[in-house]
Amino acid sequence: MRIPLIAGNWKMHTIRSEAETLARAVVQACEGLQDREVMIAPPFTALATVAATVAGAKVALGAQNVAWEAKGAFTGEIAPPMLLDIGCRYAIVGHSERRQIFGETDALINRRLTGALAHGLTPVLCVGETLDEREAGQTLAVLERQVRAGLAGTTAENPVVIAYEPVWAIGTGKTATSAQAQEAHAFIRNLLAELHGQESADRTRILYGGSVKPSNVDELMAQPDIDGALVGGAALDGESFARIIHFQ
Ligand code: PEP
């Protein structure tokens, strides 16, 4: 009942010419795709270029972050209507790089998430523990705090995607084992059921992120509670991302 979603987070990579080339490769990889969805989140400066390149293809556009107000004095921020105007359907919120490098708190991330929803964007809420937190046995407590705080004020009707991204696996080449990932995903789904009911939990997609690559995607996607992937590094390589999109 959950359509898998493979999402590429391009982070702070690609000028427009590079973005266009990469987006073309994604469009090609998505030809004839029936049973899964693909989303790419280029940097803001490449959104217009990528929107034009993917027009008419089965590739959704996402932003890497989003503000909550429609407009105003928020220097450096991008408003939800601006993203909708350029063709975005999704917005990533709470990525660990936003939390760790830019000091974004659970409360701020919740404002971004509810702002995105209020304007009709589907937020992709990223959650995940650091290595210290995992080693201290706090993984599930961290996930619970981040999911509860991130989803505060939402209802079962709000379309939300969750991405479980253990911080120690992002950009490090270390992937969570499929059993570790499944445990975290099942925990998050149970929490969603507690928050918004079983029906909502059953239809909410929970993506795994953290060094997903062609060699590990099949095993990860075989887990019952892994409904897709949020891919960083491997999404910058057209061939690798194509293989990930075509997971078996
Ligand atoms: C990410 O940035 O969300 C991510 C998972 O990166 P990588 O795939 O490079 O670990």
Image (cartoon, rainbow, N blue to C red):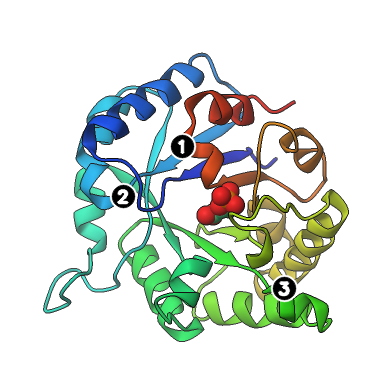
Eyeballing the image, is 127 above or below 124? below
Q: Residue at 64% of width from left, 53% of height from top?
A: 210
Furthest toward the right, the residue is: 179
Amino acid type at image mark 1: Leu
Instruction: Identify the residue position indicated by label 2 in the image.
Output: 43
147 or 129, nearer to the observer: 129
88 or 167, nearer to the observer: 167
Q: Secondary structure at mark 1?
A: helix
Eyeballing the image, is 159 above or below 86? below
Residue 37 drawn at (x, y percent): 54, 34
Instruction: Identify the residue position indicated by label 1 in the image.
Output: 236
Q: Is residue 60 left or right of residue 225?
A: left
Q: Is residue 177 left or right of residue 168?
A: right
Q: Secondary structure at mark 3?
A: helix
Residue 3 drawn at (x, y percent): 63, 38
Q: Earlier in the sequence, mark 3 or mark 1?
A: 3
Tag of residue 131: 3
Q: Earlier in the sequence, mark 3 or mark 2?
A: 2
Residue 212 drawn at (x, y percent): 66, 44
Furthest toward the front, the residue is: 172
